[in-house]
Amino acid sequence: MPRRILCVSFSPIRDDSRVLRQLSVLREFGDVTTVGYGAKPEGVARHIAVPDDAPSLPQTVGGVARLALHLHRAVELRSPGERAVLEQTVKSGPYDLIVANDARALPLAFAAAGEALVLADMHEWAPQERATIPVWRVLVGPYMTHLCRRYLPRAAAVTTVSSGLVRLYHDQFGVHPELVRNAADLQQLSPSAVDPDRIRLVHSGTADPDRNIMELIEAVERLGDRFTLDLYLIEVPGGHLDEIRARVADSPRVTLHDPVRPTELPRVLNQYDLGVFLFPLVTLSKRYHLPNKFFDFVQARLGLVFSSAPEIDARVQKHGLGLITEDTTSDALVSTLRDITEADVARFKQAADEAAEALSSAADRATQRALISRLLETA
């Protein structure tokens, strides 16, 4: 009889590249049921859809008051999203293994677990996930800390995306996470040719004000006709996609595209030269980030131009992937790119090609397979 596995993620799973890679491994071990927003992901046995209009955090006056008063136990399983799927999720069991993606999935995962072991996949640093938003920092951050403190020691295993976050989770919550990066699958691509008269920059991701996209646009406009910028952006709550769209509407060298499915992104990006990202490290989560786009750019065989962060700097230096800007301003990006040559770009793209296998998901999948196999044997 096949093993039964439950995967909980309060995200639109069909567009969540990390969860999709996770599911591809989980399906090797049994029948997978997913809980999340949007349509059923490909290949799973069953999908329990969280209504799109049902948030995963409290929205009522009472719920917000409980957050403000730190009555965190009374907040668990009370958000519209959790309440919408709680009964159906619990009754869908029993399961042999439960996977919770991020802290907010932990209460539902443990409610459905019964005798099953729980694997907590903590993608980022949960207590500061959206800490740049004052309301989130004051109300939600302490709740995320509560969830980590209560549930992570009870989890059979914990994973996270970077070595810095491994240390943080260990130091703050006494757990020993395993490293599973956000690495993309290996793509059979080659670096595209470099036009001696045109350097094609590209950025992909969410239209989030924290991502400094306006600084990218300003820098390209200042750099002159030799540079272009293409943007592949996903609209998110609190984002500023409309502002970006208006800003570039009349720009001859900045183009805004529709978003691309995660599995298709490296092939689409392959036509460009340099992936660019300026990311202020204003929280611990951001300081130790190792984002999808880093690995997407490598698989697309692009050179990288990123602002400094410990996990990024080490890999860019080790593999010779590109350049690190002095800071996250348009001035820094202009200074970094102004004198870059065709030979520089070609060298960075070749370095990405040589590092593509080492920086692919293969190592992460091996870690996940060993971990899941061990948990199922224990169960």
Image (spheres, rainbow, N blue to C red):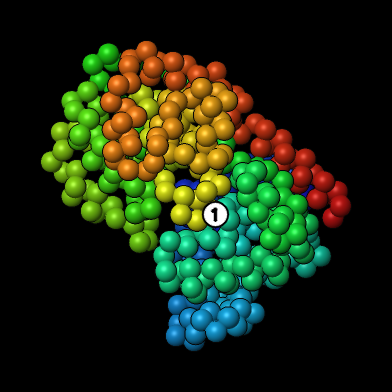
- Residue occupied by mark 1: 284
Q: Which percent across, then down, holds residue 158?
A: 71, 53
Q: Is residue 55 left or right of residue 362?
A: left
Out of 296 and 164, give the one closest to the viewer. 164
Q: Is residue 107 above or below residue 130?
A: below
Vertical comparison of 274 with 175: above or below: above
Q: Residues within 10 Å of mark 1 (few under 14, many from 20)?
A: some
Q: 347 or 180, which lies in front?
A: 347
Q: Quadrant of the C terminus?
A: bottom right
Residue appearing at x 52%, y 29% in the figure = 316
Q: Position of residue 300 (x, y in %)?
A: 45, 27
- Please state the horizontal and vertical placement of residue 47, each as a whole percent of the image: 57, 57
Q: Amino acid at mark 1?
A: Leu
At x 45%, y 77%, the residue is 59
Is residue 267 something that shows in the picture?
no
Going by the picture, which residue comes out furthest to the left? Answer: 250
In the displayed structure, 120 sits above or below 272; it is below
Q: Residue at x 61, y 72 (%)?
A: 86
Drawn side of residue 150 relative to residue 133, left or right:
right
Give the total of numbered labels: 1
In terms of depth relative to the viewer, which is nearer, 129 or 74? 129
Q: Position of residue 268 (x, y in %)?
A: 38, 30
Rendered position, 348 above or below 217: above
Local SS, label 1: helix
Q: Residue at x 78, y 61 (%)?
A: 116
- Seen as rendered, the residue at the extreme right is 378
**Residue 83 visible in the current orientation:** yes
